[in-house]
Image (cartoon, rainbow, N blue to C red):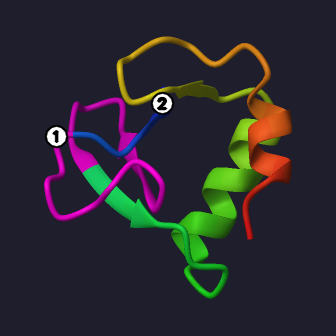
Amino acid sequence: MTTYKLGSAQAPDFKPSNCVIRTDADGSQHAIPFDPANTDYQTFKKEVLAGAELQDADGNVMTDASAFIATLP
């Protein structure tokens, strides 16, 4: 299962306001910048809107993730 978490100290080159960390089922993590031209970013938005878990930078599940997605470029 893939989960998403807003950027944090785990990815010091990315601030929470400009990236999300994707964690795959095997535990691998990938930083995805908030860039509409990035296909991973487009997939992130679609998956969260379809019910994938999104956590804030502190690891708390965001209960209204779709509202957050609506604010992104």
Q: In which quarter of the image is residue 19?
A: bottom left
Horizontally, residue 43 falls left or right of residue 12, namely: right
Which span is picked out in magenta?
9-29
User: Where does the image place residue 31, in percent across and percent down from the top left?
Assistant: 32, 58
Q: What residue type is labelled 1?
A: Ala
User: Where does the image place residue 63, in percent across and percent down from the top left?
Assistant: 73, 13
Instruction: State the quadrant of the C terminus.
Output: bottom right
Q: Distance between the residues labelled 2 and 1?
A: 17 Å
Q: Residue at x 60, y 24 (%)?
A: 53
Q: Are marks 2 and 1 in contact (CB under 8 Å)?
A: no
State whether residue 67 is above or below residue 61. Answer: below
Q: Residue at x 71, y 38 (%)?
A: 48
Q: Residues within 10 Å of mark 2 (few under 14, many from 20)?
A: some
Q: Which residue is drawn at 48% across and 54% down?
A: 17
The tag on residue 36 is none
Helix, strand or loop status at disc 2: strand
